[in-house]
Amino acid sequence: MRQSGSELCSSTLAPRGWECGYKLIISVVIISNHPICSKAYKEKMKELSMLSLICSCFYPEPRNINIYTYDDMEVKQINKRASGQAFELILKPPSPISEAPRTLASPKKKDLSLEEIQKKLEAAEERRKSQEAQVLKQLAEKREHEREVLQKALEENNNFSKMAEEKLILKMEQIKENREANLAAIIERLQEKERHAAEVRRNKELQVELSG
């Protein structure tokens, strides 16, 4: 199969059904006057011959040399020409593992008896009561904490008021004592002046009597 221009090979993908996989037809054309393609063709044929030789060691029975099998493909020689060689590349069908996983059927629920239903209801009621008791306990603890905080605040306020009152009383007493002390000092000074004046008057009277 010869192609026009510089094309040396062509490939066609032809579906053959899901159960048969896909066939990929690859036609390789070797032009006798093209040294590069001729060399590549010879190297490829050497590889295929070596593979055939290795397979013959494991399979002593006669095999079709026109068919070469790989891991997931099969190479089949179609025809031989003076100008080139054509092969048919057949891909193996998809593995059953690749199929969509089957959905597992959910286990059927067991029918509950009246006694089991009653037990479940009682257990649910017990859980409800336990949760309610827990909530009430938390509320009581919260209220107790708030009461303690309020009581502490009241005590601190009372202590502060009492201390302030004591300080005020002490200050008032000091002011009173100072005022009384100042007043006593003033009275003492006035009395001293009065005594001094009386002494001066008496001395003058004595001098007048002596001179007369």
Image: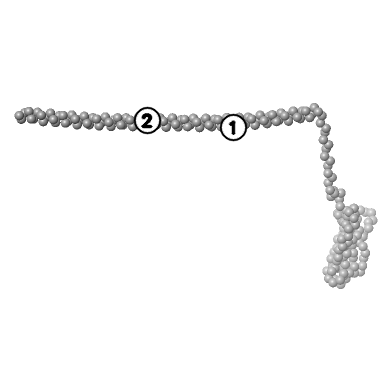
What kind of residue is marked 2?
Leu
Quadrant of res 190: top left
Q: Where is residue 191 in the image (x, y as percent from the top left)?
A: 21, 29
The quarter of the picture where the N terminus appears is bottom right
Quadrant in which the C terminus is drawn: top left
The residue sitting at 89% across, 54% down in the picture is 18
Asked whether, in this view, residue 201 is left or right of residue 10, the answer is: left
Give the camera-side residue of 20 and 77.
20
Few, some or many residues within 10 Å of mark 2 (<14, 14–19, 20+): few
Q: Position of residue 101 (x, y in %)?
A: 83, 46
Q: How many labels does the image show?
A: 2
- Is 163 rendered above or below residue 68? above
Amino acid at circle 1: Lys
Picture quadrant where residue 196 is located = top left
The residue at the point 84 percent across, 72 percent down is 5
Q: Mark 2 points at which residue?
A: 170
Query: Which of disc 2 and disc 1 is earlier in sequence?
Result: 1
Q: At 81% from the left edge and 31% from the top edge, which residue is drawn? A: 112
| Residue 142 disc label | 1
Counting from the top left corner in percent of width and height, residue 180 is at: 30, 30
